[in-house]
Amino acid sequence: MKKTPKQKISKMQRAMDAKKSTLAVKGRQTKWAPIWVVLRKYGMGKRIHPSATTARRRSWRRTKLNIKPRKMRKSHFG
């Protein structure tokens, strides 16, 4: 049985993958919910805003995520 060589992934790439997955989760944790959720949860007669059904309410303006790493290319090096 042959061993397949492991693919070499840099630390920066691994960190960027982690950042992307964190951003994907946080993007779903907004105040948005589809309209059919209200019908399913509360029934036909209720008039409730769909955002009342979301567990986490996060705004991209109000609260910042401060996800690490926030490294940028040093432009002054040329």
Image (cartoon, rainbow, N blue to C red):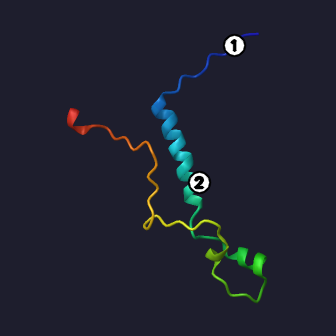
Task: Please tell me whether mark 1 or mark 2 is closer to you in this view.
Answer: 2
Q: Amino acid at mark 1?
A: Lys
Instruction: Name the residue rendered at 53%, 52% in the picture.
Output: 23
The number of numbered discs placed on residues in the rendered structure image is 2
Outermost residue to the top = 1
Residue 13 appears at what percent x and percent y? 48, 34
Residue 15 appears at what percent x and percent y? 49, 37
Q: Is residue 14 visible?
A: yes
Crowd class of label 1 (few under 14; some 14 to 19; many from 20; radius 10 Å): few
Element assignment for label 2: helix
**Vertical relation: 44 (above or below) 31:** below
Instruction: Name the residue rendered at 76%, 10% in the picture.
Output: 1
Q: Nearer the viewer, residue 4 or 68?
A: 68
Residue 56 appears at what percent x and percent y? 60, 65
- Marker disc for residue 25: 2
State the image quarter where residue 74 is shown. top left
Instruction: Name the residue rendered at 57%, 68% in the picture.
Output: 57
Instruction: Name the residue rendered at 66%, 84% in the picture.
Output: 48
Element assignment for label 1: loop
Crowd class of label 2 (few under 14; some 14 to 19; many from 20; radius 10 Å): few
Q: Earlier in the sequence, mark 1 or mark 2?
A: 1
**Vertical relation: 4 (above or below) 46:** above
Q: Amino acid at mark 2?
A: Val
User: Label 1, label 2: how many angstroms apart (C-alpha)?
Assistant: 35 Å
Q: Nearer the viewer, residue 17 or 68?
A: 68
Q: Is residue 78 visible?
A: no
Check contact, mark 1 vs mark 2: CB within 8 A: no
- Marker disc for residue 3: 1
State the image quarter where residue 50 is shown. bottom right
**Vertical relation: 56 (above or below) 4:** below
